[in-house]
Image: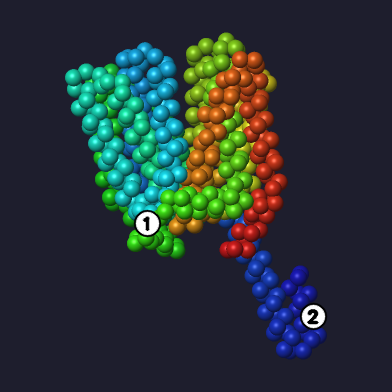
């Protein structure tokens, strides 16, 4: 109708006006059709990522090391328990790894931007393989001394501070932005399945060959990963990454540039803030779950059921998003899933029905997978490749710091309140933060700004 009205108007006017207005109308119609087509392609079924040889090798390497790390964690924890029979020692070892990583993560981002990320990943695998071999040698005549466990923890934390941002940077350089969410989903499947399968494999290896055999198996996993990564071409997608191989990157300048971009980009700041409180809610949930089981007299079977439910929900969510491409993920999508996740956490706090709690845990896991797919994809789309490592390191530091902080706070608070109230508090924190951030101007106008930029 719109086109025919224009056509009638053109016949009344002069011929030169006819051509001008016809071309204008065609541009308007074409623009509207283009917008409509783009809207239709926001979510589409696609298996193209499985034809990307580079990503498949990268993904397979991730599978191998993820399962190897799960095996190593079980074996190492079991050795510490056997040797010391002290939960304090086990807890301090895990803290050493986490704290060391947080201390070095900012410098790791600078290293990632300064050097070839492909080589960093390969060198990280080789170094960790050597450490596993040294561990095995130290254990030939019995259990290694306790101090050696802490040395290994320090070294692994420092290596992870480089390997994690390097791995994220590599992923963005072997796939198109359109497939960011799909690749994140596949990596989430890797992590979730490894968390389930790894301990079972570790238990079998420890039973048949002892803890040192499990440690050796982890070392082999790093060797296999390094070999696979040698076959991956990490050529940047689109615009070439600008690097300066002649002039060393100053540490303080690098840190300042990473923090500067973080605070000057409202969307990334908003997403990091939301993730901070979402991780806080998850930390409180993890802390309160065993006490919830005890208060409701569900027993160890109920505890296992809840953990299995959240794992299944995560796997289902990751599997679903691995089949569909979200071509233009937005902050609003991520925040909406955070609100849903927080609401289901609150639901756990207001019911004592086991089937409702199990169902809520299932949906918590599903929404957690959705958040972990969409939010990083938004961030990775906005960060320039030449400072990617520095900015990602800032994000990891800020988002990762909330969980141990709120777990410590939750442990103190649970001296006075019940586990169910802790779930209500955690869920309320996540929902409130996501809802407030959802209405920030930078979030509300993100879609329009990206449409104009494209």
Q: How crowded is mark 2: few (under 14 residues within 10 Å), some or many (20 or more)?
A: few
Q: Nearer the viewer, residue 318 or 447?
A: 447
Q: In which quarter of the image is the C terminus?
A: bottom right
Q: Is residue 420 above or below residue 281?
A: above
**Which of the numbered marks, if any, corresponds to residue 248?**
1
Location of mark 2 (residue): 9
Question: Which of labels 2 and 1 is toward the front?
Answer: 1
Q: Residues within 10 Å of mark 1 (few under 14, many from 20)?
A: few
Q: Is residue 139 above or below residue 233?
A: above
Q: Residue 77, image x and y in percent?
A: 36, 21
State the SS at label 2: helix
Can residue 208 be seen here? The reply is: no
Left or right? Give the position of 446 relative to 105: right
Q: Residue 32, image x and y in percent?
A: 67, 66
Left or right? Give the position of 175 relative to 408: left
State the SS at label 1: loop
Q: Distance between the residues labelled 2 and 1?
A: 66 Å
Q: In this view, does 81 lie above or below 31?
A: above
Q: In this view, does 388 lie above or below 368?
A: below
Q: Residue at x 39, y 50 (%)?
A: 112
Q: Residue 357, image x and y in percent?
A: 60, 22
**Which of the numbered marks, if any, corresponds to residue 191?**
none
What colour-coding does the image apply? rainbow
């Amino acid at each position: 109708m719109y086109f025919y009205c224009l056509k009638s108007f053109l016949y009344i006017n002069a011929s030169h006006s006819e051509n001008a207005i016809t071309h204008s109308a065609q541009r308007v119609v074409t623009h509207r059709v283009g917008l409509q087509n783009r809207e239709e392609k926001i979510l589409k079924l696609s298996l193209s990522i499985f034809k990307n040889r580079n990503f498949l090798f990268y993904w397979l390497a991730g599978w191998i090391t993820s399962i190897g790390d799960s095996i190593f964690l079980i074996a190492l924890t079991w050795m510490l328990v056997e040797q010391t029979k002290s939960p304090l020692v086990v807890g301090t070892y895990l803290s050493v790894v986490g704290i060391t990583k947080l201390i070095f993560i900012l410098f790791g981002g600078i290293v990632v931007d300064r050097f070839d990320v492909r080589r960093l990943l390969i060198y990280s695998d080789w170094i960790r393989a050597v450490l596993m071999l040294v561990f095995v040698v130290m254990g030939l005549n019995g259990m290694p001394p306790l101090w050696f466990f802490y040395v290994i923890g320090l070294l692994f934390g420092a290596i992870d501070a480089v390997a994690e941002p390097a791995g994220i940077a590599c992923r963005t350089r072997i796939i198109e932005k359109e497939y960011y969410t799909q690749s994140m989903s596949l990596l989430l499947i890797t992590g979730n399945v490894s968390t389930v399968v790894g301990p079972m494999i570790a238990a079998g290896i420890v039973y048949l060959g002892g803890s040192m055999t499990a440690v050796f198996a982890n070392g082999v996993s790093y060797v296999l990963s390094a070999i696979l990564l040698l076959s991956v071409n990490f050529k940047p997608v689109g615009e070439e990454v600008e690097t300066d191989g002649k002039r060393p990157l100053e540490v303080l300048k690098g840190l300042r540039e990473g923090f500067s971009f973080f605070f000057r980009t409202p969307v990334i700041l908003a997403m990091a803030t939301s993730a901070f409180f979402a991780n806080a809610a998850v930390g409180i949930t993890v802390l309160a779950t065993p006490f919830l089981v005890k208060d409701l007299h569900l027993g160890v079977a109920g505890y296992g059921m809840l953990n299995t439910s959240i794992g299944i929900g995560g796997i289902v969510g990751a599997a679903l998003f691995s089949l569909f491409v979200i071509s233009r993920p937005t902050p609003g999508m991520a925040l909406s899933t955070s609100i849903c996740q927080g609401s289901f956490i609150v639901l756990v706090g207001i019911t004592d029905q086991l089937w409702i709690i199990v169902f809520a845990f299932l949906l918590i896991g599903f929404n957690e997978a959705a958040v972990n797919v969409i939010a990083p994809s938004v961030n990775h789309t906005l960060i320039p490749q030449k400072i990617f490592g520095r900015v990602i390191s800032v994000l990891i530091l800020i988002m990762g710091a909330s969980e141990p902080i709120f777990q410590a706070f939750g442990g103190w608070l649970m001296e006075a309140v019940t586990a169910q109230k802790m779930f209500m508090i955690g869920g309320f924190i996540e929902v409130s933060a996501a809802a407030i951030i959802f209405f920030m101007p930078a979030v509300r106008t993100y879609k329009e700004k990206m449409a104009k930029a494209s």
